[in-house]
Amino acid sequence: MKNKLILCTTALCCMLFMGCPYETAVGIDATPSVKIDTRLLGTWQAKNSTDSKFIVTKAGDNEYKIEEKKKSGDKSSIYHAFLSDVKGTMFMNAKEDDGLSANYYLYKVVMSTATSVHLIPVTENITEKFATSAELRQFIEKNMGLSFFFDKNIDEYTKL
């Protein structure tokens, strides 16, 4: 379970900054309930890119703050994220803290080792919209085993 939490948190950092996963107005859980895993805290970088690094810190007992620092000197991006456990599969719910974004990005988190995590975006091709977290969770439980549910691009991140 701890490995899954680590993967989820790391995945959160990575997925937020790569690709365009599904966006939803509600998180998988109405309030974060999965406790912070300290192994996910630290600095992460995409395996295939050195353009950015992601600094993951604790924002609360169940929430993470993810700061994307770009080598180019561009302004950093800040995200707030939490993990949700859906039938033993960890998902990251991430929201950009820019004053404009109201939606969550969703990623499946798979921890390979304590220093490597894979983030798999929920496909942006899902057209359903959800008014409540309970509706979203039910949809994910029903469809997460289908081949269309996740994006084909898998992002791998390593801890620095």
Image (tube, rainbow, N blue to C red):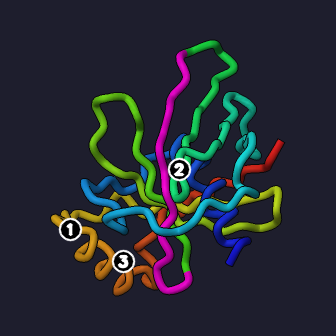
Residue 143, position as x, y percentages in the image = 37, 82
Query: Mark 2 — residue?
Result: 60
Kind of element beneath mark 1: loop
Query: Mark 1 — residue?
Result: 132
Circles 3 and 1 in contact, beta carbons < 8 Å: no
Q: Mark 1 or mark 2, which is nearer to you?
A: 2
Q: Earlier in the sequence, mark 1 or mark 2?
A: 2
Residue 147, position as x, y percentages in the image = 46, 79
Q: Residues within 10 Å of mark 2 (few under 14, many from 20)?
A: few
Q: Main secondary structure of the magenta part?
A: strand
Please, what is the three-letter code of the amino acid marked with disc 1? Thr
Please, what is the three-letter code of the amino acid marked with disc 3? Ile
Part of the protein shown in magenta: 75-88
Residue 80 highlighted magenta (yes or no): yes
Image quadrant assignment for residue 76: top right
Residue at 33% x, 76% y: name it.
Answer: 137
Kind of element beneath mark 2: loop
Q: Residues within 10 Å of mark 1 (few under 14, many from 20)?
A: some
Q: Mark 3 or mark 1, which is nearer to you?
A: 1
Kind of element beneath mark 3: helix
Q: Earlier in the sequence, mark 2 or mark 3?
A: 2
